[in-house]
Amino acid sequence: MSLPGDVVTWFTTGDHWRGDFGVPHRLYEHAVMSTAAVVAAVLIALPVGIWLGHRGRGGAVAINLANVGRALPSLAILALFQQAFGLRGWPGFGARPAFVALVALAVPPLVTNAYVAMRGVDRDVVEAARGMGMTGTELLWRVELPIALPLVLAGVRTAAVQVVATATLAAVTAWGGLGRYIYDGFGQRDNAQILAGAILVGLLALTTELGLGALQRAVVSDGLRPQQRRRSTEPVVVTA
Amino acid sequence: MRWDWVSDHGSDILAATRQHVELTAIAVGIGLAISLPLGLMAHRWRRSEGPILGFTGALFTIPSLALFALLVPFTGLSRTTAEIGLVTFTLLILVRNIVAGLDGVPDEVREAAHGMGFRPLGQLVRVELPLALPVIVAGIRIATVTTIGLVTVTGLIGQGGLGSLIIEGINRDFRTPLVVGSAGSILLAVLADVGLAATARLLAPWSRREAGQ
């Protein structure tokens, strides 16, 4: 039996689609955890980053936050949080520390991204707005945020893909999700399961990236479309 | 937290650290060797830029564990598997920064070099690359720090450096190696980040702001 054949067999085995160990349940776990973590991180990070960018304060901190966040190995953070927050033992107990770790890892780049996006708004536009008599609040909501939106959304998209990827790792620290197939597969030396898990996770990450990309295109107004060839000196993403 | 365990296993910890550094150095080295030609190609021939950046970008979307998982059935639980995966992840970072760095050289400078009689290769080596250096080194810095994090994940496939300590701690429900591995890898990453940032500033003293990022 060849490996591709084994993988197809794995996918067409009914048992793999039922119950707590089945694909739908694990996919659901993974998706819900990722979504919740991204939403929480966005709720924490965006106001901070946007506010700092609007006021022009705390630049050094905001920018270095992403550097610090990027340096932290995700597995180390997951493991430490599991020790600090979790009940050790069987899968299922790992949810709370995994969630906290995912949020903690996602917040720094989001803050930096929001800050940079806000600072990137053309100063001339800001001056023009003030010249028109806009107050600070009006400036924020009617000028700066709409202009900063593309970059902020790009950052959220990157964070979402990163969270999906890191959630895969959380399977190692007593959680479930799609990463479990990979982790269990290593343990059971079941190559088909390993590959199946990898394919599923890869598909989810790709779907997230493309889906949020489409959302980004739909939401951002036409006049603000970023150019085709964006020059960014630093990639904003760390996948696990 | 059992400090006696730490002192008993000092040599193991050092060996793990050395393995961690080795895996990282090899990955970044090979990654650089592959991405320099790729980046140069993308820079020179515009039409290749889209596919090259797109392909490496797609690779980057794959969660690290999934990439290693895809390799294991073919190359086993070996150092090769780890290195292939690690190198792959450095590619996007390095290629993108090499292209960005080279593109960032102002056209006037290029024209001036051409006017001074530089041939394309000489221009590349003596003008464009030095000017692109800050961005490229920034890329090396990010790639190195990211790789240090990813090496911990290779603990799951029998490699791992300090990651193997973390995995051991998780499997045996034993806090000490877990904390040692975690703290060690974090420390290593921070040291690499700071060290490379300082190196970047040394190498290109004329561009303060970019090197600082």
Image: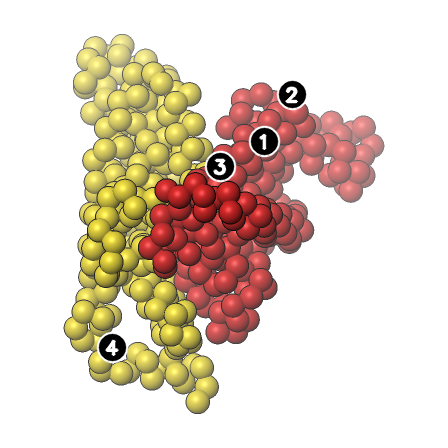
Residue type at tag 1: Gly
Name the residue rendered at 20%, 58% in the picture.
A92
Q: Which residue does the numbered mark 1 point to in the structure image?
A: B195
Q: Earlier in the sequence, mark 3 or mark 2?
A: 3
- Count neighbours of disc 4 (C-alpha within 10 A) and say few if under 14, some if 14 to 19, many if 20 or more: some
Residue type at tag 2: Trp
Q: Earlier in the sequence, mark 2 or mark 1?
A: 1
Q: Which residue does the numbered mark 4 point to in the structure image?
A: A16
Mark-to-mark CA distance, 3 and 2? 30 Å
Question: Chain A rendered in what hue?
Answer: yellow
Q: Is residue B160 visible?
A: yes
Q: Chain of mark 1?
A: B
Q: Earlier in the sequence, mark 3 or mark 1?
A: 3
- Count neighbours of disc 2 (C-alpha within 10 A) and say few if under 14, some if 14 to 19, many if 20 or more: few
On the image, the x and y values in percent for residue B65 come to 42, 59
The chain displayed red equals B
On the image, the x and y values in percent for residue B97 come to 56, 41
Mark-to-mark CA distance, 4 and 3? 41 Å
Label 3 in the same subunit as label 2: yes
Q: Which residue does the numbered mark 3 point to in the structure image?
A: B187
Label 3 in the same subunit as label 1: yes
